[in-house]
Image: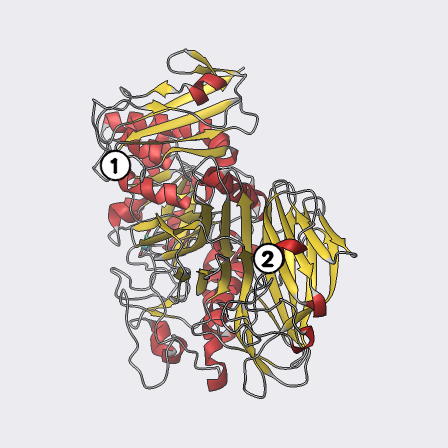
Amino acid sequence: MIAFDEKQRIFKIDTRQSSYIIGIYRENYLLNLYYGAKIPDTNLWQRAKRSKSASFSPSNPNFDNEDFSTDVAPMEYSCNGSGDFGVSAFSVRNSDGNSVTDLRYVSHKIYKGKPDLGAMPCTYAAADEADTLEITTVDKVTGVEAVLIYTAFTKNGAIARSVKVTNKGKNPVDIERVFSACVDLPSADFDMITLYGRHAKERCVEKRPLGRGVQGIFSKRGVSGHSENPFAALTEKNADEDKGGVYGVNLVYSGNFEICAECDYSGTTRLIAGINPTDFLWHLEPEESFQTPEAVLVYTDKGLGEMSRIFHRLYLNNLIRGRYKSEKRPLLINNWEATSFDFDADKLVSFAERAKELGMDMLVMDDGWFGKRNDDTSSLGDWYVNEEKLPGGLGALIKRVNDLGLKFGIWFEPEMISPDSELYRAHPDWCVHVPNRDKSISRHQYVLDVSREDVRENIWAQMYHILSNYNIEYVKWDFNRNISEAGSAVLPPSRQKEFFHRFIMGTYDLMNRLTSTFPDILVENCSGGGGRFDPAMLCYSPQIWASDNTDPIERLTIQFGTSLCYPASTMGAHVSASRRTGYETKGNVALWGTFGYELDPNKLTEDEKTLVKEQVKEYHKYYDLIHYGDLYRLICPEENAYKCAWSFVSPDKNQALVTIVTMREDIGLLHILKLKGLDPDKFYTDEASGEVYSGGLLMNAGLNVSRMAEKTGESVKIFLTAN
Ligand code: DGJ
């Protein structure tokens, strides 16, 4: 529910568990009065009073001696150059060449539902799921208008924010900074949690105390990237998995981003999230507009676990779209880890035969099927079949796979070009480059300039030819390098800094063509593992390959970290031939994700095959519980070196699946596992032992799991049902 109190000039944005409150101050400054647990009233002007003693804090000349300065006031959307010396959310360089920016309230509208953001991927909502507030602000000197858009997902609890800037003035301007969200909090007693990583070690949890000054994360790789995920949480000092105030922010964007928090001398914190201003400058002619990506904000006073569940439900209901939002996904086997580039049609068909015997649904042919690609040095951009490997072409191979009763999926890396390719020889200027500089090479490849319409047309025509001619039911969309020497041959010098954003909008355009032309194809995003695991990608692909690291023990930290904001059904997770644990643990860890296989099934022993058949049955048995249930992180790997555990609880609380993995054995240690999220008054039967326990007992007294999965790499599942 969103309300405007005309007398107090206060907006109140309520969700199930949070209130976000904005006031219109004298001369139409917009102030952030409150964001936190849901409160009934808005008597908050007292809270916004700040002493002007920061450091020569400037005043509005009309305010005489009033104790107000943009330097200290909790600004709703901080502007550069007009007295607010904190980190700016918004800065526009005007035709006089200065960057003084000063947005003030003009008007607003409140309506049911949620607007879509044009070509920008974003969340969506039915009229009864969300309310939206649009506050129109203007910089009166330039005429630049910024509409601050807030959508409250009233039952879910999240708030989505974005900004639409329109040049309503007579002269062109350049946007220097345009963040999606800015929140001023009257406390500096926070820890900051972010997800850092690298290839094969994505989304590790980093927790640090906020100190005075600016701290945060960013990407200037051209994609969201492996090294930082576009997510951050500010947690109150007493907060943990189950309690305490937590502010989470996740940016629905796959390009260069920045999320940072600035704490000042007075003990306030400003959090901003949006497009990274480095290498960004957007030119706006009169009447032109710029739409920012969306930032999703979640506040809860019930700790990180509840924050995650709010993100998960939002992404499952209001972000992921298409057939596989609700339809069961096929259980697939992918050949990459088993074969790399070394495969032919017969080998793939042998995979498909075994996969069928084991109960799987789909064979995915990974990298190496096109052009002359026998290793990673060539052919990206030449999306026609390599008939030496696949005689008779794709049609013959797919028929053989389909005849076995399996679906067929294929790999593309659409935004890339190998210097050794026909496409590069024909169009050497189509790769991302700038004049007079060497082009850095990475994995022997360059990036295609998909900000260009002609480049996109070519790549799309090639993809369309393949996808429209063959019975392909899944696409793995990969992206295996980052962007350096960024520029586009078709942009004028004054617009070169628009390149990065134009590039990612070009990617979205290609992905949109794919999903709208072929709505029945399941798309799995990937970027050297999980290097582009962000909410925007979930608008096109309901699942994203989480990491090239398929070792189940290594996967634990990756999956725990990923789960901070992304639901299980989005995490691409496969059982592979990695040797550190047995197949049981590989299966138990991969079940916390999309589940599939990444191995040569011809090499499985008879015992392993029996186990795989069991796992396939379990995949079906627990599918709904894992995909649509609530996740509870019970023991996180960074808190306990020996065992970690998680559980899924069905929405009606009648089922729970608990998984415990021993990362390091110590048989002397006592492990009492207290479950979460159950109904205290229901009685649950442990399927394996037949023992019956109340939910209250399981959550407060806990289960003694010391002797379960005792050895390093072992794991156990406990399935509980209430009747
Ligand atoms: C990186 C991906 O993460 C792998 O799964 C595989 O598809 C390779 N690329 C292929 O080059």
Q: CA distance from mark 1 to mark 2?
A: 51 Å
> x, y (%) of residue 212?
41, 60
Name the quarter where the C terminus is drawn.
top right
| Extreme-bottom residue of the structure | 96
> x, y (%) of residue 666?
20, 26
Mark 2 residue crowding within 10 angstroms, few (<14) / some (14–19) / many (20+): many
Q: Splitting the image into four quadrants, where does ligand 1 fall?
A: bottom left
Circle 1/circle 2 CB separation < 8 Å: no
Residue lying at 40% horizontally and 36% vertically, measured from the top left: 592
Q: Is residue 699 above or below residue 15?
A: above
> Where is residue 363, by image quadrant?
top left
**Whether residue 64 can be seen here:** yes
* Mark sitting on residue 161: 2
The amino acid type, in three-letter code, at marker 1 is Asn
Q: Quick one: 712 or 265, which is closer to the camera?
A: 265
Q: Quick one: 96 or 578, which is closer to the camera?
A: 96
**Whether residue 381 can be seen here:** no
Q: Is residue 706 above or below residue 25?
A: above
Q: Quick one: 7 or 217, which is closer to the camera?
A: 7
> x, y (%) of residue 400?
38, 44
Mark 1 residue crowding within 10 angstroms, few (<14) / some (14–19) / many (20+): some
Residue lying at 71% horizontally and 67% vertically, measured from the top left: 26
Find numbered disc 2 in the image and state the secondary structure of the residue it sits on: strand
Q: Quick one: 84 or 514, which is closer to the camera?
A: 84
The amino acid type, in three-letter code, at marker 2 is Arg
Of tags 1 and 2, which is closer to the observer?
2
Find numbered disc 1 in the image and state the secondary structure of the residue it sits on: helix
Task: Say which residue label 1 marks.
Answer: 602
